[in-house]
């Protein structure tokens, strides 16, 4: 579809605008949370949660074929998973990365079984939830409002706790000593991440969404020297890459998720080179 | 006046006792050095003082208007900090955070305190620099400035000179000594025996239980002290 075609028909325009708005908000949330996750060596949490998201979509699909309540079903499942991953990685005998690998593969396995048995039966369904739709996702007004509301919650909480998130990301021990409730804030980050993943995964695909969390942070860390600069740069890079990827995908008839992540990869390479050249990377 | 009174405290992990018979007090203006081998219970005691680990028995009492959350803590550096993009100012300011009264952003007073401690430690010219690009000695000064933002009374230092070259080590000890002379109480956990007997006023030698607690002078002439100070390193 050409850009002109996207905006010539009011019905199509409304679909494009809705998808674009949700995508931009999700990119913003993902990029902000990503900085903390990457620095805290928690990148795999995003990955694990998105795989749980795949399982959640499978369950939602099995429960209602119109996919009317996908968000309502997925959000609690993934939030509970976020809670479990943090608990598992800190308190159990199965440590961090192993716990996450366990959870992701289990979710994918169970999810794909549900798709085969209870889904519409076409493999296109499963492929779409893994890698995102080929066409622009048609978002209902209800989902649009819910997505916007949740994104705003994520952004507001991130803003309100920004300094505390910095403190526990940089030095958990010190934060704990000065009486910052480290456990609470870690849980907050995990829950906000879970919400962001669910909001983004239908458009970008469950395998691709974690890239959207880690890429902008890693990209800006190539050149930025302060936490604030990394946060701002990530947000800008993330939104630009999404918008560029979104239109490129529509123009060439590609899947949105992989296209956006490929654009993110190119930005990363570009920034790496820039970092090397300026001697900061 | 006793800032901290440790009263017959013991600590345990999973029911296994790692430190016991701890009974000492730290007065205002004191400089206590806690020495001992790895795994002797030093770090556990420190966590107890910070309130991260609850005593299994006994108690730790705070006096002299000191709250547990007002301890300026200098932890050991972590792997995460090695490539962390943060400016010196951001790091120092984070010492001003507390959950006692929730404010999302730093106040003008916080910023003044941060600037004041940076000036005091002569790192104000580094304020906009990137933390990961500093020398090890400068990094410790930055983390010390952050600790000073969190306290007016007590500093708790965990192996502050680990990984520093000899020059930076002497330099940091001098700074800590100066801070102590200005009236801030210092508790330092260290392997460095020679520094302990040079700078500390009191020494606590740990080995699951206190082997020695008393003044530096008594320690040097005690049998435990002789054994360890002559070896140089605990």
Image: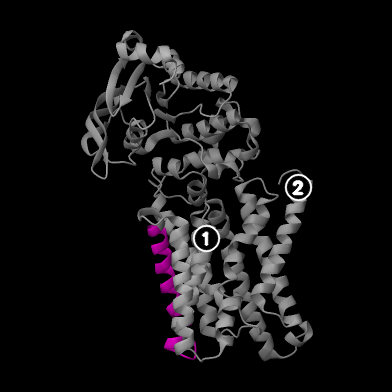
- Residue A269 x %, y %: 73, 58
Q: Residue at x 51, y 37 (%)?
A: B77
Q: Main secondary structure of the magenta part?
A: helix
Is B15 in the magenta? Answer: no
Q: Which type of secondary structure does the marked residue at label 2 adopt?
A: helix
Whether residue A70 appears in magenta in the rendering, the answer is yes
Query: Percent position (x, y) of residue B226?
Result: 36, 11
Task: State whether residue A71 appears in this view.
Answer: no
Left or right? Give the position of B18 relative to B170.
Answer: left
User: Who is closer to the viewer here, B104 or A138?
Assistant: A138
Bounds of the magenta segment: A62-88
Mark 2 belongs to chain: A
Residue occupying the point 40% across, 17% down = B200
Q: How much space separates mark 2 and mark 1, taking CA atoms? A: 26 Å
**Residue occupying the point 50% across, 52% down:** A165
Find residue A66 and report its horizontal and vertical position in percent.
49, 91
Q: Is residue B104 above or below residue B142?
A: below
Query: Quick check: marks 2 and 1 in contact, CB under 8 Å?
Result: no
Structural crowding at the residue carrying mark 2, measured as other residues with C-alpha within 10 Å and reported as few (<14), some (14–19) or many (≥20): few
> Residue at label 1?
A44
Q: Is residue B189 above or below residue A163?
A: above
Q: Residue at x 45, y 45 (%)?
A: A172
Q: How many marks?
A: 2
Secondary structure beneath dot 1 equals helix
**Circle number at residue A276:** 2
The quadrant in which residue A280 appears is top right
């Amino acid at each position: 579809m050409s850009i002109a075609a996207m905006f010539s028909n009011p019905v199509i325009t409304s679909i494009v605008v809705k998808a674009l708005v949700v995508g931009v908000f999700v990119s913003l949330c993902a990029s902000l949370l990503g900085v903390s996750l990457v620095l805290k060596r928690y990148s795999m949490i995003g990955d694990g949660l998105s795989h749980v998201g795949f399982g959640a979509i499978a369950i939602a699909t099995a429960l209602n074929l119109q996919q009317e309540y996908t968000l309502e079903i997925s959000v609690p499942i993934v939030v509970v998973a976020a809670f479990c991953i943090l608990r598992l990685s800190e308190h159990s005998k199965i440590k961090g990365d192993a716990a996450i690998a366990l959870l992701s593969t289990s979710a994918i396995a169970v999810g794909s079984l549900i798709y085969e048995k209870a889904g519409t039966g076409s493999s296109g369904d499963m492929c779409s939830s893994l890698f995102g739709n080929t066409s622009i996702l048609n978002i209902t007004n209800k989902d649009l409002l819910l997505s916007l509301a949740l994104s705003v919650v994520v952004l507001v909480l991130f803003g309100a706790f920004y300094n505390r998130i910095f403190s526990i990301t940089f030095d958990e021990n010190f934060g704990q000593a000065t009486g910052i409730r480290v456990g609470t804030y870690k849980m907050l980050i995990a829950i906000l991440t879970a919400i962001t993943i669910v909001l983004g995964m239908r458009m970008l695909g469950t395998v691709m969404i974690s890239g959207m969390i880690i890429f902008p942070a890693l990209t800006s860390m190539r050149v930025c020297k302060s936490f604030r600069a990394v946060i701002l740069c990530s947000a800008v890079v993330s939104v630009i890459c999404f918008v560029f990827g979104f239109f490129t995908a529509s123009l060439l008839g590609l899947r949105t998720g992989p296209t956006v992540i490929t654009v993110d990869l190119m930005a990363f390479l570009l920034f790496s080179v820039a970092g090397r050249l300026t001697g900061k990377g | 006046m006793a800032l901290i009174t440790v009263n017959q405290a013991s600590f345990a992990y999973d029911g296994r006792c790692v430190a016991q018979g701890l009974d000492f007090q730290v007065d205002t203006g004191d400089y206590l050095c806690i020495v001992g081998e790895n795994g002797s219970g030093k770090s556990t005691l420190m966590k107890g003082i910070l309130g991260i680990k609850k005593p299994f028995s006994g108690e730790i009492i705070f006096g002299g208007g000191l709250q547990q959350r007002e301890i300026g803590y200098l932890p050991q550096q972590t792997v995460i900090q090695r490539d962390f993009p943060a400016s010196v100012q951001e790091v120092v300011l984070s010492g001003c955070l507390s959950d006692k009264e929730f404010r999302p952003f730093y106040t003008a007073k916080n910023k003044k305190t941060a600037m004041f401690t940076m000036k005091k430690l002569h790192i104000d010219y580094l304020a906009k620099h990137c933390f990961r690009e500093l020398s090890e000695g400068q990094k410790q000064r930055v983390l010390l400035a952050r600790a000073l933002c969190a306290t007016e009374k007590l500093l708790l230092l965990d192996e502050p000179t680990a990984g520093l070259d000899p020059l930076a080590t002497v330099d940091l000890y001098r700074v800590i000594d100066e801070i102590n002379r200005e009236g801030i109480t210092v508790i330092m956990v260290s392997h460095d025996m020679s520094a302990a007997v040079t700078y500390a006023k009191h020494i606590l030698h740990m080995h699951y239980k206190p082997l020695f607690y008393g003044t530096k002078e008594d320690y040097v002439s005690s049998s435990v002290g002789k054994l360890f100070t002559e070896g140089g390193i605990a």
